[in-house]
Image: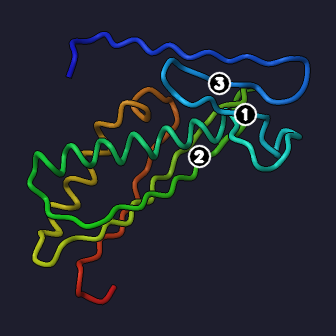
């Protein structure tokens, strides 16, 4: 890892209507719109879905690193997130994030270690650590060859 602080530069460009193009050097641009809940069209990433996507992406990447360091044998991880946007004290903000990881372990892997790694991934995710929203973890752990 490079020494901190890290700096990330992203650009957004748009006109009075239509999509906003979000881009960064060396990356494919994303076309965004307001979400349908704010009157936008279906089928586009929005700031809200991008934030939820950043949360689950950061969680999976954190899990990978911690699982590798912990020597956890695992097969697959799928994470769903529910990010709740609400109005509190006259301010619209994200108030709750529910992470729902579903982890499939290799046969013979330790479920206790797996649950510890899932918890550590939540604790080390820099995106959720940067939010004021409450973040909860609702993990499901399955072992290969063992009925769920």
Q: Residue 25, image x and y in percent? A: 50, 17
| Quadrant housing the C terminus | bottom left
Marks 3 and 2 sit apart, C-alpha to C-alpha, by: 21 Å
Q: Measuring 29% from the left and 70% from the top, which residue is drawn there?
A: 104
First reached walking from the N terminus: tag 3 or tag 2: 3
Is residue 36 or residue 93 the one in the foreground? Answer: 36
First along the sequence among labels 2 and 1: 1
Based on the displayed image, in which of its 4 quarters is residue 107 positioned?
bottom left
Label pair 3/1, CB-CB below 8 angstroms? yes
* 6, above or below 52, in the image: above
Q: Secondary structure at mark 1?
A: strand
Residue at mark 3 to residue at mark 1: CA–CA distance: 7 Å
- Determine whether label 3 and label 2 are within 8 Å by CB: no
For disc 3, the marked residue is 22
Mark nearer the viewer, 3 or 2: 3
- Nearer mark to the viewer, of 2 and 1: 1
Q: Which residue is mark 2?
A: 83
Estimate how packed mark 3 is, as few (under 14), some (14 to 19) or many (20 or more) residues with alpha carbons within 10 Å: some
Residue 32 pos. (x, y %): 73, 33
Q: Is residue 84 above or below residue 113?
A: above
Q: CA distance from mark 2 to mark 1?
A: 18 Å
Does residue 48 lie above or below 11 as drawn?
below
Could you tell me which residue is drawn at 32 percent across and 43 percent down?
A: 61
Q: Measuring 23% from the left and 87% from the top, which residue is drawn there? A: 145
**In this picture, residue 19 sits left or right of residue 128:** right
Q: Could you tell me which quadrant the N terminus lies in?
A: top left
Q: Which residue is mark 1?
A: 32
């Amino acid at each position: 890892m490079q020494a901190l602080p890290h700096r990330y530069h992203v650009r957004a460009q748009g006109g009075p209507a239509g999509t906003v193009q979000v881009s960064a050097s060396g990356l494919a641009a994303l076309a965004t719109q307001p979400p349908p809940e704010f009157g936008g069209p279906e089928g586009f990433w929005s700031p809200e879905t991008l934030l939820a996507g950043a949360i689950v992406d950061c969680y999976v990447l954190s899990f990978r690193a911690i699982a590798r360091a912990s020597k956890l044998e695992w097969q697959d991880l799928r994470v769903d997130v529910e990010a709740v946007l609400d109005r509190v004290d006259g301010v619209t903000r994200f108030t709750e994030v529910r992470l729902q990881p579903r982890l499939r372990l290799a046969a013979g892997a330790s479920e206790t270690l797996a649950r510890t790694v899932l918890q550590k991934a939540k604790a080390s995710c820099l995106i959720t650590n940067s939010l004021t929203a409450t973040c909860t973890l609702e993990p499901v752990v399955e072992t290969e060859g063992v009925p769920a």
